[in-house]
Image: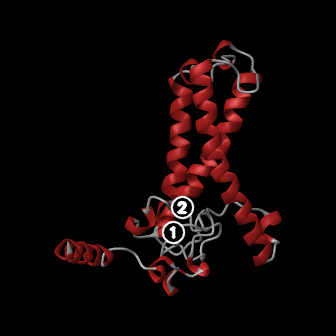
């Protein structure tokens, strides 16, 4: 009986070596509240997302910032996709409710309308997109502020740097919302084939 007790104590002591202690369950100094993600407070803040970019709240659950070498390039892509999404949401709604004269421009189907207008119109659109992309290509790799393509008037230029930062934060929030909105709106239309607003 004593031998069995001795074996039990030895096994329990070995297992206890692998059990977490109370101290190990407490947050370490490297994971203080200041270093936790603002958007996901139960996850540590990614190292590169230190708050220097406007709108950075430490949201990177997939760790993309760890493999992305240049966050300015990633921000350029985010803003560009967001601006396109904002235009797409407006275009999707306008296509369903505003019909211009002519058979080619009166198709209420936002996806069918692309084919209705013909090749010439689509080529023109792609040409001007290419011109804008080519004119701003170098800005993705230099020290230009992300999203700055020089298209702002006196309204933005007359603002103080603090006011400009507020406008930039508003834009990035609208961009993120529009990217979610266009995916949802397109999915809804493709599944139900009904206008977005009923």
Q: Along the horizontal axis of the image, is 93 left or right of 22?
A: right
Picture quarter with the N terminus = bottom left
Residue 106 seen anywhere in this rendered image of the structure: yes
Q: How many marks?
A: 2
- Give me the residue at 61% from left, 62% from top: 149
Taking depth in this image into account, of 198 and 5 the one nearest to the observer is 5
Determine the secondary structure under disc 2: helix
| Residue 136 in picture, x, y percent from top left | 53, 60
Image height of 92 relative to 113, above or below: below
| Residue 8 in picture, x, y percent from top left | 24, 72
Residue furthest left in the image: 3
Q: Mark 2, residues whose alpha carbon is within 10 Å: few (<14), some, or many (≥20)?
A: some
Location of residue 7 (image quadrant) = bottom left
- Give me the residue at 51% from left, 53% from top: 133
Determine the secondary structure under disc 1: helix
Location of residue 39 (image quadrant) = bottom right
| Residue 193 in picture, x, y percent from top left | 62, 17
Circles 2 and 1: CB atoms closer than 8 Å:
yes
Residue furthest bottom in the image: 29
Picture quarter with the C terminus = top right
Q: Mark 1, residues whose alpha carbon is within 10 Å: few (<14), some, or many (≥20)?
A: some
Location of residue 98 (image quadrant) = top right
- Give me the residue at 36% from left, 74% from top: 19
Image height of 12 relative to 86, above or below: below
Q: Along the horizontal axis of the image, is 166 left or right of 36?
A: right
Q: Which residue is mark 1?
A: 72
Identify the disc placed on residue 22. none
- Give me the residue at 70% from left, 22% from top: 195
Image height of 45 relative to 195, above or below: below
Q: Which residue is mark 2?
A: 76
């Amino acid at each position: 009986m004593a031998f069995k007790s001795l074996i039990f104590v030895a096994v329990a002591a070995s297992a206890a070596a692998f059990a977490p202690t109370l101290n190990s369950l407490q947050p370490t100094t490297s994971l203080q509240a200041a270093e936790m993600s603002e958007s996901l407070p139960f996850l540590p803040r990614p190292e590169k997302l230190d708050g220097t970019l406007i709108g950075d709240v430490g949201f990177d659950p997939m760790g993309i910032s760890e493999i992305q070498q240049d966050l300015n390039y990633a921000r350029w892509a985010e803003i560009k996709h967001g601006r396109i999404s904002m235009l797409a949401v407006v275009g999707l709604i306008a296509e369903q409710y505003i019909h211009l004269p002519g058979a080619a421009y009166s198709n209420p189907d936002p996806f069918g309308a692309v084919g209705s207008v013909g090749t010439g119109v689509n080529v023109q659109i792609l040409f001007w997109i290419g011109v804008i992309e080519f004119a701003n290509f170098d800005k993705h790799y230099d020290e230009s502020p992300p999203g700055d393509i020089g298209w702002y008037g006196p309204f933005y230029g007359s603002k103080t740097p603090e006011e400009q930062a507020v406008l930039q934060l508003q834009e990035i929030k609208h961009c993120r919302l529009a990217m979610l909105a266009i995916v949802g709106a397109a999915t809804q239309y493709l599944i139900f084939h009904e206008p977005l607003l009923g």
